[in-house]
Image (cartoon, rainbow, N blue to C red):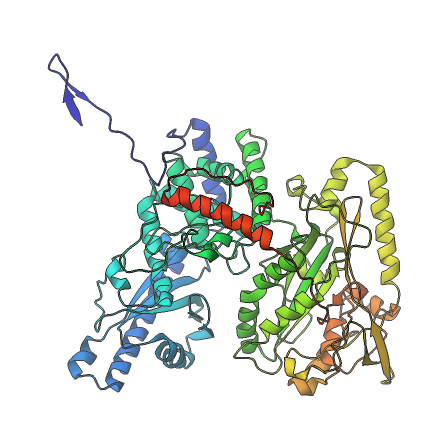
């Protein structure tokens, strides 16, 4: 813009800086020479880490998308013909494929899946046409493998691999008889006369487009997001289904930081990301634009009107109508873990800016299996690999409910850290996998002598919900057991064995999450001696032979009526095949020794009726799961030492009594009654804070944001 000065000469007048987002930028500063140098080093590190796909793989993805587009077009034409439409309608019948997620945002890496959406006409439905007819078409194709329909998900999806490329395919039926190839999905007219599941399916693409429109510099946004997603995976906080954050959540958080620092380069944005979110006052929402209502009437995120929105701990709001919280899965426990990791990232970035650390230090993997003294292990088994794929997907999607239930039944005193990675014991030949959760007492709460957290009832409630799987088949089962850190199975470690603790990188010492780091930092000889004595005591207990109870399969119909008591007698078999009675008392005992968490779960209080492998449809598993037929030398010695003296004909019991983890692994036989916790006070506090935040977001006569409730619900 030019103006004329009093002397007649023309002079340029600077335009006011454009605001992105709902607030002014924090800083308009650009990069210094040091920032540019750090940015070059960061980009080099990301390339060397293999985060960018090759041209050949990119071309293959385009080819696969073309094939899928042809398949869905043919599918719609077939349905149109079967339903008696005219030849002209059959000729015009069409379906369009859109991408969303990391692929549409331009931040996908090698091997990443492609999030795709199929938009079809109004007469082609999701329930039968998509999940049955199209599913059967795909199942018959040689190019398609690992086909897994998930119709009951929050956003119904069909997962499969096409020529080795992972595809997540959604379906949306819009109110048009003919879907044009040039359909503008960003227009709100596509939302007319559709249900909420269809809106959620459509919004994946609509949100991705809005994000790219609302960031100041798309190139800088993409590199920063690629970097933060890689960091989140390395630190174990990348998983929407587990209760952490998924791809769209990280994209929205990064986009907001880009708005706050519009002229910053990616190296600066990464550092500012951690600086911003370590200080963010949750549950204040992260928003890229204001929330607007529309005449279509779909609910938007608004704690004033929607009671369930008041209990969201980490709201990250999508920018496309209808604006929703994309991070509703986050719990108090997972928010606590993420805040700890944000603090870790902030410390490392400060060191990088002071030239005291390299970028590689930021991406050191989180040593989850050294961070806690106690873990829950959730083993998932099935009769064959295809069944495991579907069964695992169902169980994994419900694992966060176990975290929420433990929080509820212990009044938040027992904290869970669910780990999103799955593990497989390659020494076992049957289909299975395992997930783990770290357990610790809430920080700052002193443990009383003998205080117990009985979560048997909690786990039983969780198992009952899992058992409602509508596609259950014989052989599908889960087992929840307690494992001490010293007795974790070898297959969870990258090299198949535990690393010496003295080799830990200093950057892994996060303080709050790992009790052993606190010990090493304090330099207290007394504390170290105490730990040594505690470990010796544990070793003595582990060397004692111990009888185990067999656990029946998951199906609740098989539960014997006389297993309701908190103390019962079950039947097992010794090495001679003789029946023996096994009596167990079960507690989850969390003791505090000099401020360090110690969880002690005794053997189960409930013994279910013993059933043979044939009864659960797995006649082959007995031999595969024999306790002493394991190649590991240490395990063979353990068998000889008598940790598993009983030899059972029940394959599930053999699996549970895997000698690799010894007697420290306790199956929770889940008929204890979980503690009933009155949370009304906490709820009231949460609701009050959420409503006050909502008023500040949507506008109110009062701008007060009093988040200091008597009962704090922040971690």
Out of 163 and 127, give the one closest to the viewer.
127
532 left or right of 48? right
Residue 104 percent across, percent down from the top left: 35, 56
Residue found 76% across the figure and 70% down from its top: 658
Tell me if residue 332 can be seen.
no
**Which residue is farthest left?**
8
Residue found 84% across the figure and 38% down from its top: 525
- Compared to residue 702, the image places residue 458 above or below, namely below
Residue 381 percent across, percent down from the top left: 63, 74
- Compared to residue 533, the image places residue 242 above or below, namely below
Tell me if residue 562 can be seen.
yes
Residue 353 percent across, percent down from the top left: 52, 31
555 left or right of 168? right
Residue found 67% across the figure and 62% down from its top: 676
**Which residue is farthest top?**
7
490 left or right of 286? right
Out of 473 and 660, give the one closest to the viewer.
473
Residue 301 percent across, percent down from the top left: 40, 53
Out of 183 and 33, give the one closest to the viewer.
183
431 left or right of 68? right
Count up the numbered dots: 0
Residue found 70% across the figure and 84% down from its top: 613
Location of residue 402 (image quadrant) = bottom right
Image quarter of the N terminus: top left
Location of residue 268 (image quadrant) = top left
């Amino acid at each position: 813009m030019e103006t004329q000065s009093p002397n007649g000469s023309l002079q340029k007048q600077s335009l006011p800086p454009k605001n992105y987002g709902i607030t002014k930028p924090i800083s308009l500063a650009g990069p210094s020479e040091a920032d540019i140098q750090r940015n070059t080093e960061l980009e080099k590190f990301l390339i060397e880490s293999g985060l960018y796909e090759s041209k050949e793989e990119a071309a293959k993805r385009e080819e696969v998308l073309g094939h899928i587009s042809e398949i869905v077009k043919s599918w719609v034409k077939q349905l149109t013909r079967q339903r008696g439409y005219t030849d002209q309608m059959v000729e015009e019948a069409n379906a369009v494929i859109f991408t969303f997620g990391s692929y549409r945002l331009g931040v996908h890496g090698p091997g990443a899946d492609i999030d795709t959406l199929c938009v079809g006409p109004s007469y082609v439905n999701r329930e039968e046409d998509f999940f049955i007819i199209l599913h059967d078409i795909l199942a018959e194709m040689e190019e398609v493998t690992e086909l897994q329909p998930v119709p009951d998900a929050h956003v119904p999806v069909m997962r499969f691999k096409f020529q080795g490329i992972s595809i997540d395919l959604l379906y949306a039926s819009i109110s048009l008889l003919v879907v044009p190839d040039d359909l503008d999905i960003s227009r709100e007219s596509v939302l007319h006369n559709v249900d909420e599941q269809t809106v959620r399916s459509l919004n994946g693409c609509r949100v991705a487009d809005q994000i790219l429109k609302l960031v100041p510099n798309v190139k800088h946004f993409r590199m920063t997001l690629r970097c933060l997603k890689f960091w989140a995976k390395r630190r174990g906080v990348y998983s929407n289904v587990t209760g952490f954050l998924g791809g769209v959540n990280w994209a929205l958080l990064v986009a907001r930081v880009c708005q706050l620092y519009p002229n910053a380069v990616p190296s600066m944005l990464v550092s500012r990301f951690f600086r911003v979110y370590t200080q963010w006052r949750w549950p204040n929402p992260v928003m890229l634009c204001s929330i607007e209502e529309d005449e279509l009437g779909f609910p938007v995120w608004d704690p004033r009107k929607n009671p369930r929105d008041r209990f969201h701990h980490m709201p990250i709001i999508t920018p496309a109508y209808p604006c929703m919280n994309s991070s509703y899965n986050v719990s108090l426990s997972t928010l606590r873990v993420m805040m700890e990791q944000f603090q870790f990232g902030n410390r490392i970035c400060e060191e990088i800016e002071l030239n005291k650390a390299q970028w590689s230090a930021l991406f050191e993997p989180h040593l989850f299996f050294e961070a806690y003294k106690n873990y829950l292990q959730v083993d998932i088994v099935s009769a064959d690999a295809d069944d495991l794929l579907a069964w695992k997907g169902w169980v994994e999607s419900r694992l966060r409910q176990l975290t929420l239930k433990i929080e509820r039944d212990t009044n938040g005193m027992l904290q869970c850290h669910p780990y999103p990675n799955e593990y497989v014991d390659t020494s076992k030949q049957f289909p299975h996998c395992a997930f783990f959760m770290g357990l610790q007492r809430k920080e700052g709460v002193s443990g009383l002598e003998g205080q117990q957290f009985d979560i048997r009832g909690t786990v039983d409630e969780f198992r009952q919900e899992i058992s409602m799987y509508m596609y259950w088949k014989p052989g599908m089962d889960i087992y929840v057991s307690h494992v001490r850190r010293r007795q974790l199975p070898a297959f969870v470690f990258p090299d198949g064995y535990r690393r010496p603790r003295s080799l830990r990188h200093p950057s892994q010492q996060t303080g709050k999450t790992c009790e052993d780091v606190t010990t090493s930092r304090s330099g207290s000889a007394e504390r170290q001696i105490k730990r040594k004595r505690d470990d010796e005591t544990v070793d003595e207990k582990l060397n004692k032979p111990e009888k185990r109870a067999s656990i029946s399969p998951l199906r609740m119909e098989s539960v014997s009526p006389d297993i309701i008591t908190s103390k019962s007698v079950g039947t097992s078999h010794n090495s001679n095949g003789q029946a023996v009675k096994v009596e167990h008392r079960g507690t989850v005992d969390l003791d505090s020794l000099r401020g360090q968490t110690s969880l002690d779960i005794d053997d189960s209080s409930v013994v279910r009726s013993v059933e043979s492998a044939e009864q659960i449809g797995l006649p082959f598993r007995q031999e595969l799961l024999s306790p002493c037929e394991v190649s590991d030398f240490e395990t063979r010695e353990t068998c000889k030492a008598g940790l598993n003296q009983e030899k059972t004909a029940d394959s599930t019991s053999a699996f549970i009594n895997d000698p690799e983890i010894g007697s420290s692994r306790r199956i929770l036989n889940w008929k204890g009654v979980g503690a009933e916790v009155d949370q009304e006070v906490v709820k009231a506090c949460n609701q009050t804070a959420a409503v006050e935040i909502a008023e500040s977001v949507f506008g109110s006569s009062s701008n007060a944001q009093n988040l200091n409730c008597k009962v704090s619900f922040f971690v």
